[in-house]
Structure formats: structure tokens, C-alpha cells
Amino acid sequence: MSNQDSQGLRIDEDMEVTLHFTLSLEDGTVVDSTRDKAPATFQVGDGNLPPGFEHPLKGLAVGDTGSFEITPEHAFGQHNPQNIQMLKRDDFESDEPEVGMVMSFADAAGGELPGVIRKIEGEQVEVDFNHPLAGRTLTFEVEVLDVKPATTH
């Protein structure tokens, strides 16, 4: 398919999209951006982007830009107090926990779950397993560079 043909395509399910994006907090702090590196390429619906980020992109075409406010419910969820756990200092075998440190923990399924050390009191260590951006409203700015039908590998 030539570049000419893709000009009329719009972002929808099963489309491969290449774009530049900037993700920022309410106060304008940039959390992530492709502006200073290679653009991001993903297939709509492949799980690489939360649905709340994909939905506002639908209907955009090559050359389109947009700025979208993504609420916590559509981004990384609300901050859940149940995701804050108290662990014993003895549970930390090799690394000595420090406040602010992000550590990897094994989850029940055998995968890895990141947690942030929030507080250390004596033998108790408070670990927050919420996504670091949970509870935050984010601004998602995009510039669509390419849209084409996804090819299955």
C-alpha cells in the first residue's frame, strides 16, 4: 500500500498507528513523551494502551493532532487504599528498603508487581502497589504520523 492510500485512513480497531505523544499531569509536569525519541507504534486494541487512551484517538487521521484529558477511571484507575500493604522488614531478603524506592514483588500468579516504599517504621514497611499515576487526571497530547491496516505476524 502506498503512502497515498493511507492518507484517508482513520484510527479504528485493527489499525496500526504511529504517533508522537506527551503525557502530563494536571500541573503540566511531563510524565512520558516520545518527542525526544522515536515515535510510538501500536495496534488499536492490542492492550499496549489503556482503552481510555485509545478511545479519543478513534477517527483521527495522519497529520491530526489532539489534546485529551484522561480521567483516572479511564487511565490508571483511582488510588485504592487496599493496595497499600504492610510488610515485615524481614520479607526484604536482599535489598534494604528505602522510602521512595520502587521494588519488584512476586504476585500470586508468579508475575512481578511493582511497589513503592512509602514508609518504614521499625520492622514494618508500608508498600503502595497502586500504579504511580493512579488517581491522576492526565493530559494526553498526540500527533498522528501514520495509520494503516494492522498486519498479523
Image (tube, grey):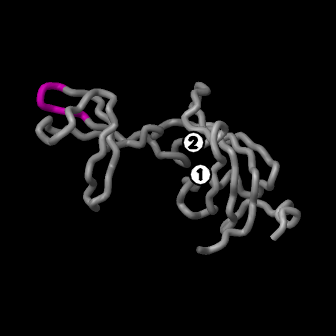
Please rate how many residues cluster around mark 1, counting C-alpha atoms within 10 Å: few if below 14, some from 14 to 19, many from 20.
Answer: some
Question: Is 136 placed left or right of 80 in the picture?
Answer: right
Displayed quadrant of residue 21: top right
* Image coordinates for residue 57, horizontal then vertical, percent: 70, 53
* Image coordinates for residue 142, horizontal then vertical, percent: 70, 44
* Image coordinates for residue 153, horizontal then vertical, percent: 59, 74
State whether residue 82 appears in this view: no
State whether residue 146 appears in this view: yes
Residue at 66% x, 48% y: name it: 39
Displayed quadrant of residue 3: bottom right
Image: magenta residue range:
121-126
Q: Is residue 122 magenta?
A: yes
Residue lying at the far bottom of the rendered structure: 152
Q: Which mark is residue 68?
A: none
Residue denoted by label 2:
71
By secondary structure, the bulk of the magenta-drawn segment is best described as strand
Instruction: Residue type at mark 2: give it.
Output: Thr
| Location of the N terminus (image quadrant) | bottom right
**How far apart are the alpha carbons under marks 1 and 2?**
8 Å
Instruction: Residue type at mark 1: give it.
Output: Gly
Residue at 28% x, 61% y: name it: 109
* Image coordinates for residue 125, horizontal then vertical, percent: 20, 33
Residue at 47% x, 46% y: name it: 77
Q: Which mark is residue 52?
A: 1
Please rate how many residues cluster around mark 2, counting C-alpha atoms within 10 Å: few if below 14, some from 14 to 19, many from 20.
Answer: some
